[in-house]
């Protein structure tokens, strides 16, 4: 794994959504793609947040969201502390970041800050099995 770069194991393309989209669209996109997270991007395709299955569990437990008739936007529930890696970073860097922050999904951006991939715990498991 020491010679492996993020680019070699990242999942690409990434399913993305906009901050002002309804949360129901996000849930449908995740279900349709059978994925555990969505990266929320701006018009420049730069990550603004991340939305995971855990966020949906938290949302389901929040009675204020469940009792209203208005469907919240992705912006209302997304995690905005987005930590990213670049594709040429060593895989160890991504693993350490994910371990320290207890992340299961880590967006990958190019030099311009645009989303180009995501590293997931599934990607890491697949890589370790291949070794």
Image: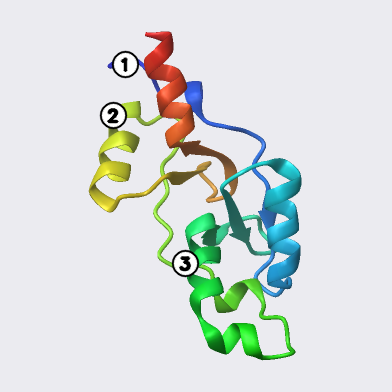
Q: Position of residue 21 (x, y in %)?
A: 73, 71
Find numbered disc 3 in the image and state the secondary structure of the residue it sits on. Answer: loop
Q: What crowding class fits label 3: few (fewer than 14 Cα within 10 Å), some (14-19), or many (20 or more)? A: some
Q: Residue at x 41, y 13 (%)?
A: 129
Q: Is residue 97 left or right of residue 5?
A: left
Name the foreground residue: 88 vs 65.
65
Q: Residue at x 41, y 42 (%)?
A: 85
User: How much space separates mark 2 and mark 1, taking CA atoms?
Assistant: 8 Å
Q: Position of residue 62 (x, y in %)?
A: 51, 81
Closer to the eye: label 3 or 2:
3
Find numbered disc 2 in the image and state the secondary structure of the residue it sits on. Answer: helix
Residue tagged 3: 79
The vertical placement of 2 against 46, above or below, is above
Q: Residue at x 49, y 21 (%)?
A: 8
- Is disc 3 in contact with disc 1, using a CB cutoff of under 8 Å? no
User: How much space separates mark 3 and mark 2, taking CA atoms?
Assistant: 24 Å
- Rendering quarter of residue 106: top left
Q: Is residue 126 left or right of residue 11?
A: left
Q: Is residue 9 left or right of residue 44?
A: left
Q: Which mark is residue 1?
A: 1
Q: Residue at x 62, y 43 (%)?
A: 35
Find numbered disc 1 in the image and state the secondary structure of the residue it sits on. Answer: loop
Q: Position of residue 14 (x, y in %)?
A: 64, 42
- Is disc 2 in contact with disc 1, using a CB cutoff of under 8 Å? yes
The vertical placement of 17 against 88, above or below, is below
User: How much space separates mark 3 and mark 1, taking CA atoms?
Assistant: 29 Å
């Amino acid at each position: 794994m020491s010679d492996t770069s993020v680019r070699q194991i990242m999942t690409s393309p990434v399913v993305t959504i906009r901050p002002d989209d309804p949360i129901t669209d996000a849930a449908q996109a995740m279900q349709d793609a059978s994925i555990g997270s969505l990266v929320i991007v701006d018009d420049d395709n730069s990550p603004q947040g991340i939305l995971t299955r855990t966020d949906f569990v938290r949302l389901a437990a929040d009675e204020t969201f469940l009792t209203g008739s208005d469907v919240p936007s992705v912006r209302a529930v997304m995690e905005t502390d987005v930590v990213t890696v670049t594709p040429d970073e060593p895989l160890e860097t991504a693993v350490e970041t994910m371990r320290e922050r207890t992340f299961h999904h880590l967006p990958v951006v190019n030099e311009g800050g645009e989303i180009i991939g995501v590293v997931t715990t599934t990607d890491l498991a697949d890589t370790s099995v291949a070794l």
